[in-house]
Image: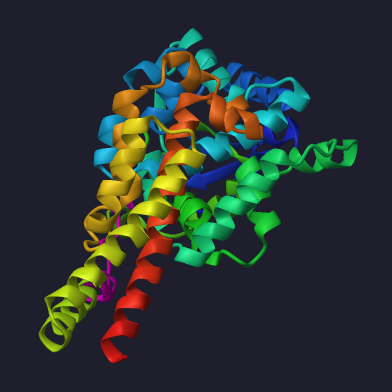
Amino acid sequence: MTDSPFPANEYSSDVHVLQSDDKTIILVGTAHISQESVDLVKSVIEQEQPDCVCLELDDQRYQALSQKKQWQSLDLKIIIKNKQLSTLLVSLLMASYQKRLGGTLGVKPGAELLAAAETANQYQIPISLCDRDVRITLRRAWKSTSFLKKGYLLSSLLVSLFDKEEITEEKLAELKQKDVLSELMDEMGETLPDLKRVLIDERDIFLIEKIKTSPGKRIVAVVGAGHVAGMKKQIHVDNRDQISEISKIPPVSKGFKLLGWAIPLLIIGSIMVIGMQKGVSDAGANVLFWILANGIPAAIGALLAFAHPLTTIGAFASAPLTSLTPVIGAGYVTAFIQVMTRPPVVKEFESAGDDIATLKGWWKNKLLRVFLVFLLTGLGSAIGTWVGGYEIFKNLVG
């Protein structure tokens, strides 16, 4: 397989023509916030009239771009039940970052992908959605990142949101050479190699394999410019056997599961030993300390998030119990209560991308307040676990 000396490269340096067996792939690298990219994909599709147009989209992202009412189908209760609040938050943070940059250029993020789909439909050209399911990508990314680096990722995204620095002409020119996700990866440098592997490298493989198996012999593929180099390398490799593996959400390691159960078992065991050695009253005092040490910080977290009163009560009641099991955390319990007592409305889902970039917006928007409840009560419960555990172990050996 070799690059084909095809005149499509006359469009611009963002158009690359590859040959895969009997299939010609016209690869268009775009910036997801560039009007030039919108014009380019329209021009290429109109002129080439390919057999198929491949897009760097999965079905969920395609529906989100093409349907204005996509938020109405999002069920927060199911997301909480499936423990996907963290991945939804990261998705919103990234989308908001794209939207902020796109607003500077007057272009909606993903406009060139939507334009490619609309142009293909106009000429009755089949569309192939070639990206990995965004939910799998985000969950693989989250699971591949250590606890400390999760914090670094979230803080980096938050800093990028609140950064009001004007984007210079030089910066705009640079953005045209790569997509926004690659820009984020560059800003993080080599600190998060596992995250880059999942978000970029795995998707390079997934995209090119899906494109190679799309119908037709002449294909126009529209992808973020940050994927082009990796995809050109991978087109010469048969990675079909990797697709199944990189489409799975990795299970929690056995070591992590054992650690998750070891801590609560040690705490419960310590209280039982205290009861046998020092009496029931001392054991009862330690149980009471555990309840207060977990319940009070979790409830304070709910109060700081301006949670519903029932959510605050739920935080105090659930934290001492959830801290003794790795199955569910206090943050998920309180987020569920908050959704039930103060459910976000559709307009708050739609405005979350703007509200997330302001401190006031986190408390004003009911959807973002659910995330605040999730994060702050979870943090309070974690603090309580360490404080309560330390006190119990101290009493055991003291």
Q: Would residue 43 be seen by someone viewing this image from the given angle?
A: yes
View extreme (right): residue:
169
Q: Is residue 134 left or right of residue 33?
A: left
Residue 141, position as x, y percentages in the image: 44, 54
The correct choice, above or below, for 277 with respect to 14 in the image is: below
Residue at 68%, 25% (x, y): give it: 40
Residue drawn at (18%, 69%), measured in percent from left and top?
284
**Outermost residue toward the top?**
122
Q: In the rendered image of this protein, does residue 148 appear above or below residue 156?
A: below
Left/right placement of residue 190 relative to residue 145 reads right
Q: Quadrant of residue 269?
A: bottom left
Q: Nearer the viewer, residue 96 or 155?
A: 155
**On the rendered image, what quadrant is the C terminus found in?**
bottom left
**Residue drawn at x 50%, y 57% as measured from the top left:** 201
Vertical position of residue 203 compared to residue 151: above or below: above
Main SS of the magenta segment?
Answer: helix
Residue 145 on image: x %, y %: 46, 62
Q: Quadrant of residue 33?
A: top right
Q: Please provide the residue range marked out in magenta.
A: 246-263
Residue 185 horizontal/vertical position (percent): 63, 54
